[in-house]
Image (spheres, helix red, strand yellow):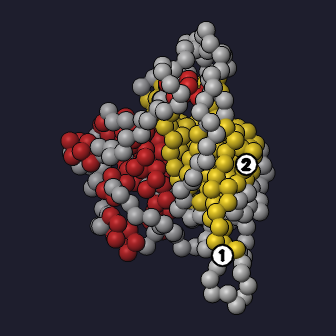
């Protein structure tokens, strides 16, 4: 099956360097530079036998040389990861700031220091199924892979999961535009109040292996996070550039990627959200109505879909089709000296 590269890459040299670092780990060549050693430490935790990295390198090698050359130029294994550290640091400087914290007003509520916060996946909504098929065509069979990325003990850690959890088919069936699927409710990440990034990838089931994709995504994200941590950059900002642009070059070709997005939660935002009621997700959708075989002008109208998806925040997935994934934040203890506070009125969230 031909590999699909669905979007341009905003920072191709940085993406290529991470691929080269993964290639070095996969080859088993002893790490010599400090950054190679940092990558080795990070990837050993998720891929101790190097088989996942080897699989990812194989995926990359199967992409046509013409396709790779258009984006990366001449790709010489070992050349990029061996660049001087000062040059690499400039190369990986993040371009996107993701620290807006607009939940509630005033200071975040205070929780006991040992409170465990959990980011919970609640479901997904289809604004537009994949492909240009407004009236006829097959329904989608999507699934979601989430990776919660955080720092613990000075090292980046990852918790990843495939949704729908517990489904033997590992995907939702017969999803059409305007439909949603609730749960199964499952944790994406759990820990003490801290900064955490939720990398979310929506895939369309075809003939791929969701568990293999989960492993590959986790390994690629671990490498990108290790690079950011090595240079002292914000892990969330660095992941934004790589997760949205780089993952598709490394994961297998059996299923199509519908879209990748990343949500960043600060410690304050976790506390605010856990102390805030959820909303039911609503979304605006454009509908093309069938006007008859002899009509040249299709009828178009906007509708608002009401779902039963509890949300504190969402991720948007728009590379192929339009999907929204919904999440909420919970805490295992109540805040000190106050209860749940109200929030602003329900409002429409327009995806994409």
- Secondary structure under tag 1 reads strand
Instruction: Establish if 315 lies above or below 129.
Output: above
User: Residue 317 location, x and y as percent?
Assistant: 56, 55
SS at badge 2 = strand
Q: Is residue 332 left or right of residue 201?
A: right
Neighbour class for label 1 at 10 Å: few (<14), some, many (≥20)? few
Say few, some or many: other residues with alpha carbon within 10 Å of mark 2 (under 14 / 14 to 19 / 20 or more).
some
Which quadrant of the view contains residue 339? Answer: top right
**The one of 25 and 91 positioned closer to us in this rendering:** 91
Q: Position of residue 136 (x, y in %)?
A: 72, 76
The residue sitting at 64% across, 44% down in the picture is: 326
From the top left corner, tell me how far across and down residue 152 is, in percent: 48, 25
| Residue lying farthest to the bottom in this orientation | 294
Q: Nearer the viewer, residue 122 or 42?
A: 122
Q: Residue at x 72, y 50 (%)?
A: 306
Q: Which residue is mark 1?
A: 299
Name the one closer to the observer, 211 or 325: 325
Tag on residue 65? Answer: none
Q: Residue at x 35, y 58 (%)?
A: 10
Label 2 vs label 1: CA separation? 24 Å
- Residue 229 falls in image quadrant: top left
Q: Residue at x 66, y 75 (%)?
A: 299
Q: Is residue 40 visible?
A: no
**Which mark is in front, 2 or 1?**
1
* Residue 90 spot, x, y in % from top left: 24, 45
Viewer-proximal residue among 327 and 81: 327
**Image position of 95 (left or right of 207):** left
Of callouts 2 and 1, the N-terminal one: 1
Q: Which mark is residue 307?
A: 2
Whether the residues at callouts 2 and 1 have beta carbons within 8 Å, the answer is no
């Amino acid at each position: 099956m031909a590999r699909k590269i669905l979007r341009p890459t905003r920072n191709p040299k940085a993406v290529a360097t991470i691929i080269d670092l993964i290639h070095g780990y996969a080859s088993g060549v002893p790490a010599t530079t400090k950054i190679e050693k940092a990558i080795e430490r990070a990837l050993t935790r998720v891929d101790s036998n190097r088989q996942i990295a080897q699989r990812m390198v194989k995926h990359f090698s199967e992409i046509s040389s013409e396709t790779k050359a258009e984006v990366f130029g001449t790709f010489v294994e070992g050349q990029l990861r061996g660049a001087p550290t000062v040059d690499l640091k400039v190369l990986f400087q993040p371009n996107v700031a993701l620290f807006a914290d607009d939940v509630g007003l005033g200071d975040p509520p205070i929780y006991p220091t040992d409170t465990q916060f959990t980011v919970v996946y609640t479901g997904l909504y289809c604004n537009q199924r994949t492909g240009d098929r407004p009236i006829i065509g097959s329904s989608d069979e999507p699934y979601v892979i989430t990776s919660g990325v955080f720092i613990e003990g000075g090292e980046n850690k990852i918790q990843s999961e495939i949704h729908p959890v517990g489904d033997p088919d590992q995907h939702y069936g017969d999803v059409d535009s305007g439909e949603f699927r609730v749960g199964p409710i499952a944790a994406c990440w759990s820990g003490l109040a801290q900064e955490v990034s939720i990398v979310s990838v929506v895939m369309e089931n075809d003939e791929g292996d969701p568990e293999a994709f989960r492993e590959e995504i986790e390994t690629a994200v671990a490498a990108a996070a290790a690079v950011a941590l090595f240079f002292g950059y914000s892990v969330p900002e660095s992941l934004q550039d790589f997760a949205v642009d780089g993952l598709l070059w490394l994961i297998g070709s059996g299923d199509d990627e519908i879209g990748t997005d990343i949500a960043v939660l600060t410690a304050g935002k976790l506390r605010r959200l856990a102390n805030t009621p959820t909303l039911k997700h609503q979304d605006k959708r454009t509908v093309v109505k069938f006007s008859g075989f002899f009509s040249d002008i299709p009828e178009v109208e906007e509708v608002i879909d009401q779902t039963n998806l509890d949300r504190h925040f969402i991720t948007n997935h728009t590379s192929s089709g339009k999907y929204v994934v919904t999440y909420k934040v919970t805490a295992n203890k109540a805040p000190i000296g106050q209860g749940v506070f109200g929030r602003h009125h329900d409002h429409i969230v327009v995806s994409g």
